Amino acid sequence: MASWLGCVPTTDPEVNVAGKRKAPTPASSKTGTSGSRRSWAFGTRSSIGADGARRTWSERLTFRNRPRRTWKQWLVRGVTYVTVTGLVLALLAVGGFVYLYKTIDIPQPNDAFLSETSFVYYEDGESELGSFAEQEREIVSLDEMSEHLKDAVVAAENRTFYSDSGIDPKGILRAAFSNASGNSQQGASTITQQYVKILYLTQERSYTRKIKEAILSLKVQREQSKQEVLQGYLNTIYFGRGAYGAEAAANAFFGTSAADLNLRQSAVLASVLNNPSGLDPANGKDAKQRLKERYAYVIGSLLEVGDISEAQATKAGKRLPKMPEQEAESSYGGQKGHMLTMVKKSLQGLTNKATGAPFTANEIDGGGLRVTTTFSQKAMDAAEQGVLDAKPEGFGDKELHIGVASVEPGTGALRGFYAGQDYLDSQINWAVSGGQAGSTFKAFALAAAIDQGFSLRDTFEGNSPLELADGTPIENQGDADWGSAIDMIYATEKSANTAFVDMTLKMDDGPQAIIKMANKMGIPPRKPGKQPGFPDSSPGLLPNIGVALGSQTVSPINMANGYATLANGGVEAEPYVIEKVTDADGEVLYNHKVETSRAISADIAADVSFALQENVQDGSGTAALALGRPAAGKTGTATATDADGESVVSSAWFAGYTPQMSTAVMYVRGKGNEQLQGWLPSYFGGAFPAETWTAVMRYEMEGLDVEEFPEPVYVDGDAPGGLDTAPSYTAPAQPTRKPTREPETEEPTKEPTKQPTKEPTPEPTPEPTPEPTPVPSETPSGCGLLGCPDPDPTPTPQPTPQPSQSPSGATAASDRRTAAPTGPTTMTTPFAW
């Protein structure tokens, strides 16, 4: 038998290198190329054991037959395995945490939680009117918060706040186990974690957000002190009732500041922040009971941590503090919504000194601005109460719309207005939208005529109708004749349409001159431009022959401002509503500067004012005599043509002033120019509008000195065409005043039934079907070059005035004048009232 040491084949397949017989070779053993069996690696097949050593078949069989491990061995083995695995996972977790800590940066804060409420004040800068807010919040320092509040929140929410690292590992594990077990999802947030979640993250419930929350909490903890974190938390957390932050919550729940909260009030706020809706006692008995339970927990927590004594806890725990009933009215209810809307629109057109750009929506809603307006509580209340006192009984505000505006002469400040319906029911502000101006526009025509050289004593055609060159008739109300040559004082009293159209035709480019004068005095042009106003345009203000009769749409605010120019001696002031804007720290961002310009001379203003005073004394505006002090004003009653071609009374006005205040009142119906005739008990401007004006002004003038207007000057220049009647003027015995002071033109004194004695049309249409809009188109239907003339009707017109009523006497009713217009006269035939 031959054998070799090493890796050498043996000739006997049954014998190994040690001379011992091998175990039988499996049938699967392979042979060499010669067909003989061979074994390699020490002459036998082997395998590698767990210890790395090669084992023979016999050894392997022996290994398999070893006795099984005991349970202790298995335990040791399992513990070893778990320990090793745990160490590996811990190392991976630490590595992952380090990686995340280095890669997750503190993001930009959520904008909404950095926002601060902007407050709006009345003219005194102290009385709050309302506010703008993405979230109702007023940021205050920690020193401006009650110690009770700080202690209560920490005791209830995070007792270890001042000592922990910003996170609660035990709480996180507890919440994770609960969530993994399928229970309701739990938080486990410290105050720092809650602050981070509010300021930087979302309210999503996920493990990913929780990990980010923990990492960011650690970072915030390193970068901010505990005081800074608590201050930020108490200024951002939601307490309910729309209040974000402690200051807003103190006001919402108790009508006080965060600094003045007592122990019980503080405990309530520390309770409700846990569940703002479910713990608000305003939400029912169940919510109140839940609040009592949470409140008891908070008081107990304060006692346990030693922040209060047992005596304090006992006393505070007896009952909840008194909470004022929550106001059901929205902050935008009533007229306040209209006021705040006007303020916001005005702010967006003003320049912020800090940025050099207009105030943005974000700055207004969340910039912590302090906005002082021009609005006076007295004037706002006067406008609303005056409307309620004088409007006809039985008429709601869904169909009857009344717009009122009061502008201060000399400054242009809008002190008060009445927009119509509750803002929550309708957002149309009728003090801004306006309506057809009617004969209130004659004041601007009179100023333009005197500016061109005419005089109050110059006379014009007062009989009706006045036929234009193309045969178009211009009529007075009731087709009344007031005389063939009546002066402008008498024409203003009677609101004689024929006289004003005759005057317009005799002026140099009369229609355009009247528009230019109106613009100078404060009425915006037809299209928006640089001139300010509310709104900044007057649709329909076109150079028609009848422009003085008022077919154009004018807002009560702009009308009041135009009349304020007369009250201010001819000096116009731009209207405005924003007096001052500061930031939360008091830095001035905007300060209004009164902008004025002379529109007409003081003498012309005095003459126009005199004519308007006479209208109050003896004309269509005698209802204003009840004010009991000098007043000047003009009535207006406009007509338009509806979709069916019928003439409708579309608006009724009274605009007037004292030396201290200018106010305009407008009545419209439905969409803005629907039929008033046959619907209102009396639709003339001298009835309900004049009575409303008087009621409003009575409230506004209360406590103010009685001031007189300047005497008339009777300015007389070189009128176009050489018209100048002053040298031959002979004053009548009583040219303007009537001993009984009874109105003889537009309206009678108010009757119990408020029914006029004569209707201007034989068959009124109480329910027309027009399709107007609050701001009519530039030229309403039925309005030609003459426009839509304004009826200033009189219930008892006198067919032929006495000679003493006009400087030149009156002609017979059949004597009609034919005007020679200076421009084209193609037009429809309106009823010129």
Image (tube, rainbow, N blue to C red):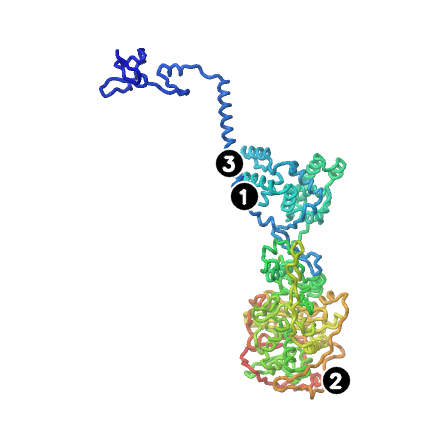
- Element marked by disc 1: loop
Q: How crowded is mark 3: few (under 14 residues within 10 Å), some or many (20 or more)?
A: few
Residue lying at 75% horizontally and 70% vertically, measured from the top left: 626
The type of residue carrying mark 1 is: Asp
The type of residue carrying mark 2 is: Ala
Residue 345 in the image: x percent, y percent?
A: 60, 61
**Mark sitting earlier along the chain (3/2):** 3
Depth check: 745 or 38 in front?
A: 38
Numbered label attached to residue 105: 1
- Element marked by disc 3: helix
Residue 468 in the image: x percent, y percent?
A: 57, 82
Residue 827 in the image: x percent, y percent?
A: 54, 78
Depth check: 202 or 543 in front?
A: 202
Instruction: Single out the residue that lies furthest toward the bottom.
Output: 728
Q: Residues within 10 Å of mark 2 (few under 14, many from 20)?
A: few
Q: Mark 2 points at which residue?
A: 733
Instruction: Single out the residue that lies furthest toward the front.
Output: 5
Instruction: Name the mark nearer the viewer: 1 or 2.
Output: 1
Depth check: 333 or 25 in front?
A: 25
Residue 545 in the image: x percent, y percent?
A: 58, 78
Assess whether mark 2 and mark 1 are in contact (beta carbons under 8 angstroms).
Answer: no
Q: How crowded is mark 1: few (under 14 residues within 10 Å), some or many (20 or more)?
A: few
Kindly indicate the quadrant of the structure image that contains residue 603. Answer: bottom right
The type of residue carrying mark 3 is: Gly
User: What is the CA distance from the residue labelled 3 to the residue labelled 2?
Assistant: 106 Å
Instruction: Name the mark nearer the viewer: 3 or 2.
Output: 3
**Mark sitting earlier along the chain (1/2):** 1
Residue lying at 48% horizontally and 20% vertically, measured from the top left: 74
Q: Mark 3 points at which residue?
A: 96
Where 343 falls versus 100 (above or below)? Answer: below
**Mark sitting earlier along the chain (1/3):** 3
Image quarter of the C terminus: bottom right
